[in-house]
Image (cartoon, helix red, strand yellow):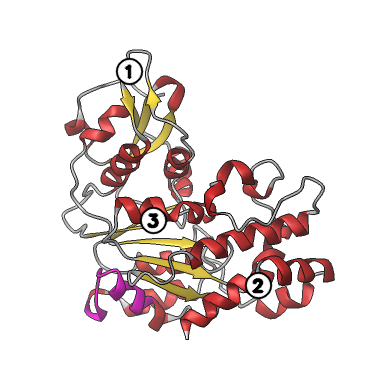
Amino acid sequence: MPQHERRDVPSQLHGRIPSRFLFDKFIVHWTRLDEKGLAEPFFHQTIERLRRTGQHDVIATSISVLLRIKEEIRPNGFIFHISRCGSTLLANAMRCFAGSTVVSESKLISKALLLQHDLIRFTGESVAREDLLRGLVRSYGRRQTEQDTSLIFKLSSWNITHIDVFRHLWPDVPIAIVIRDPLEVAVSLMKGPPGWLAESRFDELVRSDIRSHVELQHSQTMESRCARILGEYLNAALLVAHDPLCCLVDYKDISLNKALEIAKFFNIATRNDVDMSALEATLSKYSKDPNAARLYSDDTLLKQGSASNQLREEINVRARPFYERLLGQLH
């Protein structure tokens, strides 16, 4: 259990990162990292490993402490994606570059994005959403070792519908957007649906002012809803694809050379700053396996061949036009 709440103790947060919000109590939990750091493909996997090994050392502070954290490492890049498209593989590759920290799908960032108004404590203390996001990013960018020099964030898929928030808060930070043929993504999503694919969740997550105005009826099938949501993600990517600080990455183009290209785009390293054998090994493994034991295999043909006619039709109407326009900007 966390120790009693501490208010003005940024100095005692060395080696710790924000790991949980308790908005109703105006509290943030800080977890101490071990020497492995954020080594797993996903943020929650690191926290789970620390719990499993009995190293989950947590303290609690007021959320307002986040606002007093000073920036040490400014973000080098944000990775957005449309889900099940190779973004985790790309993020894992960024970890191979010397001095890089990759924060992959922190739920705290997602929770902050969902705030519709300022957080207000019973004492009158308040925190604005934008300040909360800035504080989170600064907190994840605190150096854990002297070798830490760069910081990359991989966001959750639906966060792409809030991409303008990141462009507003960090207008000089490059962004990479990973896309894939939406039919292949949809096949994967239908097989293992994430929470945001639930009928009632999407309208909560996606801001109405960026939607493509394709109505979502409650009577729609899962196939139709999935296609519409992917269309919204791809449409959100289109809205920023013209930005010179935006780089589109298609799944089929992810390779060692593409990883080096993105690292250069994020200004995190050169060929001299990466263990090429480690990078090649990372790209050869199934990206979501925290033990890096399972080998990667291209499932493009399998997904294309297993799609139902209904899913194919829905994707062609609701998502593929956006994808084709994005491909046009890649070439």
Residue 21 position by quadrant = top left
Amino acid marked by disc 3: Ala
Q: Which range of residues does the magenta coloring cover?
A: 259-272
Q: Secondary structure at mark 3?
A: loop
Tell me where residue 308 appears, x and y as whole percent: 82, 69
Q: CA distance from mark 2 to mark 3?
A: 35 Å
Amino acid marked by disc 1: His
Q: CA distance from mark 3 to mark 1?
A: 29 Å
Q: Secondary structure at mark 1?
A: loop
Question: Which numbered disc flags the more N-terminal residue, 1 or 2?
Answer: 1
Q: CA distance from mark 1 to mark 2?
A: 52 Å
Task: Locate the N terminus by quadrant.
Answer: top left
Tell me where residue 217 appears, x and y as whole percent: 76, 48
Residue found farthest to the top: 123
Amino acid marked by disc 2: Arg
Tell me where residue 101 appears, x and y as whole percent: 31, 57
Residue drawn at 47 percent across, 86 percent down: 331
Nearer to the camera, 60 or 292: 60
What secondary structure is the stretch in magenta mostly built from?
helix
Q: Which residue is mark 2?
A: 320
Q: Is residue 61 visible?
A: no
Q: Secondary structure at mark 2?
A: helix
Left or right: residue 304 compared with residue 130: right
Tell me where residue 279 appears, x and y as whole percent: 38, 75
Which numbered circle lies on residue 4?
A: 1
User: Which is more foreground, mark 1 or mark 2?
Assistant: 2
Is residue 88 highlighted in magenta?
A: no
Task: Please report contact status of discs 1 and 2: CB closer than 8 Å, yes or no.
Answer: no
Say few, some or many: other residues with alpha carbon within 10 Å of mark 1 (under 14 / 14 to 19 / 20 or more): few
Residue drawn at 28 percent across, 56 percent down: 75
